[in-house]
Structures are given as structure tokens and as C-alpha cells.
Amino acid sequence: MGTVPASPKFILSVDQGTTGTTVIVVDSKASLLAKVTHEFKQYFPKPGWVEHDPDDIWNSVLKGISQALKEAKISAFQVAAIGLTNQRETTLLWERKSGRAVYPAIVWQDRRTAPLCASLKKAGREKLFHQKTGLFLDPYFSGTKIRWILDHVPGVLTRAQKGDIAFGTIDSFLLWKLTGGQVHKTDATNASRTLLMNLKTLRWDSRLCSVLGVPMKVLPEISPNVGILGLTKNMPHLPDGIPIAGMAGDQQAALFGQGGTFSGDVKCTFGTGSFILLHTGQTPVLSRWGNVTTLALYLNGRPSYALEGGAFICGAAVQWLRDGLKIIRSSSEVEGLASSVSDNGGVQFVPALAGLGAPYWKPEVRGLLCGLTRGTQRGHIARATLEGIALQNVDILRAMAKDFKRPINVLRVDGGASENDLLMQIQADYAGLRLYRPKIIETTALGAAFMAGLGVGFWKNLAEIKKNWNKEKEFIPVLSAKEREERLKIWHQAIGRSRL
């Protein structure tokens, strides 16, 4: 399609998520000119297994780019840079020559490596991984997923040892595809989620690779979040030479999109799961209370760190009400249904449909719906679902405050489920915090756009970017401290029952 002209005016950002891909186009004032989302199929071949077809992911990206350019009414030649953000721990191995995946993408929610994690814990390896990576030995993270593919796909281990196979989280896969197979890189935030990167050196750790049996030849180069990682090549809908200039895992991108670049800034993204990041500054804080220590940003040669707590099921619980129980026809109906009753009618829901994440880390636990009576209505189940989503976040926030040794006063929220006003008020009440919701809730895609723009000088500095963040609504807690503690006591009783 030729080359890029001298003065492009827009940033294109790709947010490749768990259930779909969102592509946005923004201008220099961060005005949202286009937003296109394409969902793709989820595969559940066995209980606890979750997979994606890499071709489905890539096709959703291509469709999203094409339609976003049309919706924004701009030419591809007007794109100054591309930002990428992604579902982080989802794992792919592909052939370097052909670009074909050797196995479907194993999704971050997948629990198949729980036995391997258990055996590593039994061998006394968890302390090593926790000290070097800030993470726990859990099937959530990428390293054990790589090991599973190497062990279960015939011939792949030998080919990986020869250097014929490439590993990547979805950021690496998209960068590889966008650059015509020329660039095999990941960014430091995604690398920090693999169990293989040393959190202090920001390099792959040979000892950790050895323990997991992962050949270092499969690993991508680790790069900063901001800067030109590669140029488009042989892409439909795009000319050659557009810089991919910003890349980060989805939760770090959302923190950046919320302006969370200072110690004490905290955000919660309400997506498929809910993920809370608390910026802790230039020194990593090793959690004692069940959170993980992770990278917040790698910019200008300086890393900054965060505490993170993730609940694996958030919006996915509402999807379960829609697709599994079929008590709603669309996800948007849940707020109205939950509002049709004054309380939960005694119904409790623990949304551990993919195990319990932070601060419990119990992959074997499953969801619990209890307290049902003849008087239970659909509205009670819907309300209990929203309460369960909020209550699991309270556990994470309280654990974070203990680790950080400072109180949290304001929580910035984003993601699709943050549009639910009832859920946001419930979250404010149970957490005892003010919630700020921005005008643009697609802060994951926006954060990647900000990084890409910063990488090519579209925006000059962080201060210029921060001017583009605007609050749309504030939620103020109305529950008394006594009412809050009583509700949390009932919640923890339900958690105890779910762990039987």
C-alpha cells in the first residue's frame, strides 16, 4: 500500500481481550473517533480448560482495524502509530518459518496445569518463583502453560530446543503478525506475567526457565512499553511502515489510561475478570497478603511497580447468567433485573467459576450459589451475582492496603461492567471507597494509544496525556461501617463453604 506520509493525525489502538477484540481510533485530544468490537468463540474441551483459535484472534483484529478506520472516516495513511494491549497470560507457541500455531492458545483462565503447580510447590519451589518474579505458582501464569504444550504436542520440545519454535503472549503474536513475521518481542509488563522474568533485572531468568524446562530459544526479546517496537509490513488495510510504538498487558495499559503513574494510584478494570492494580513506585513491594507483585510500567529505562489482585470471574459471571442459566437475554439486562428487588433475599453467590484468585489462590475451588428458598426470584440471583463481583474485590483491596501500609481512598474504575451503575454503587458501599468512572471507560485501549502516541512524539510527555483524563461520574459509599462489616462476615462464611 506504499509508505506513511509525513504528518499523520491519529492513533489506532488494538485491545485484544479474552472474549473479543476492541479497536479504537483517537485524535490528539484523546477524542474517541471510532470503537469497534468483535467477539470470537471460546473453546472448553475439558472441565477447567479454556482455549482460543489463534486464527480467530487474528481475524478479529483484522476486521476491527478495517471497520474502525471506516467508522472514524480516516485513511490508513493518517495513522501515526499503533498501540497494542492484550489478555496477558494467554500462551501461544508457533513455527517461526510458517507462523502456524502448534496448538490452540491456552487462555489465562485455563486450570490444566494445576497438578504441575502443586508438584512444584511440594518440591519447595514457590519461594524461588515468588522472590524472583513476585508471582505465585498458579496455573494462571504462562510458564506452566508453555511446559504443558512442550510435553503434550509431539515433536515440539525438540524443535523448540533447536530454535524453530517461538513463544509469545498475545502481544508478541500480534506484533509478529503486524510486522510480517519480522519482529519477535514482548514488552516487560507481559513478560512479568510468565513466571520466567526476573522482576528486578527485567530479563529472562535462566534458573526459572530451567526449573520449568522452557528452552530460552523460544523466548521473545523484552522491550520497554513505549518506543518503536516494529513497523507494519504486508498488512491488509494498512500501509507498510506504521510504527507499533506502544505495547502493554491489558491491566497495565488500563492503569496508564487512568493516569495511574504515581505511587498510590489504584484502578479496577471490570472485564471478563476484575483486576486491581495499585502503583507502588520505583521499588517492588513483595506481597505478604496474597497479591502479586508486578511491573506497572517500563519507561525511559526506569521500571515502576504495582501490586495486583485479580478475580478471575467478573463480567463472565453475568455472561454465565445469560448463557448458562439463561435468566437474562443480554448482559445489559442484569442491572435492571438486580434492581427489581430491594436486596439479595438471602442468596449468596461466590463467582469462583474458574477457581479463586487473589488473595486466596485456590484453583480447585468452584463457584457456590446458596441461600435459595421457594421465594427466590431471578432478581435475587442477579443481585447476588453483582454483590459477589464487588465483594471479591473488597478482599483484594483490603489485602493491598495491608501490603502497601497506606490507606486507599479513591478507586478509579473502567471496563465494560463499570457502565453498570448499580454494580458501581455496590462496589463503593462494600469497599467503603469513592469510585471515579472516566468519560472513556475503554481505558485499556486508551492506555495503549497513549503509549503509542508518546512513542512517536504525538504527545510530548505524561503531563500532556494526563490532561486528557476526565471524570464522568463519582460513586460515594452510603453504607455504615457496621453494615459493611456485617455483610463481609456473611460473604466470608460463603467463601468458607465454597472451599469444602
Image (cartoon, grey):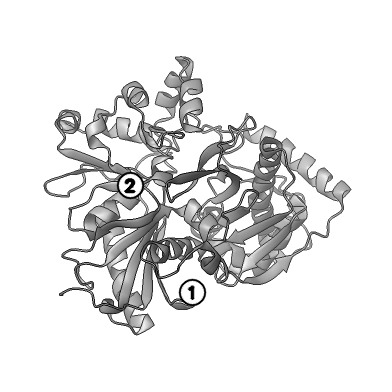
Looking at numbered disc 2 in the image, what kind of residue is underneath it? Thr
Residue sitting at the far left? 97
Question: Can residue 417 be seen by looking at this rendering?
Answer: yes
**Image: 452 above or below 204:** below
Give the SS element for disc 2: strand
Closer to the camera in the image, 104 or 269? 269
Residue placed at 78% from the left, 58% from the top?
A: 343
Q: To which quarter of the image does residue 438 belong?
A: bottom right
Instruction: Using the image, tell me which numbered label, if any, was put on residue 30.
Output: 1
Give the SS element for disc 1: loop
Closer to the camera in the image, 407 or 334? 407
**In-image side of 177 versus 135 (left or right):** left
Residue 305: % across, % down: 53, 43
**In-image side of 79 versus 396 (left or right):** left
Residue 57: % across, % down: 31, 57
Question: Can residue 325 be seen by looking at this rendering?
Answer: no
* Label 1 crowd (10 A; few <14 / some 14-19 / many >=20): some
Residue at label 2?
186
Residue placed at 59% from the left, 69% from the top?
A: 333
**In-image side of 99 versus 441 (left or right):** left
* Label 2 crowd (10 A; few <14 / some 14-19 / many >=20): many
Which image quarter is the C terminus in? top right
**Image: 242 above or below 496:** below
Q: Earlier in the sequence, mark 2 or mark 1?
A: 1
**Image: 24 above or below 90:** below
Closer to the camera in the image, 212 or 482? 212
Residue placed at 29% from the left, 24% from the top?
A: 213
Real-space Cα separation, disc 2 to disc 1, in angstroms:
26 Å
Residue placed at 46% from the left, 45% from the top?
A: 302
Looking at numbered disc 1 in the image, what kind of residue is underneath it? Ala
Residue 45: % across, % down: 34, 43
Residue sitting at the far bottom? 73
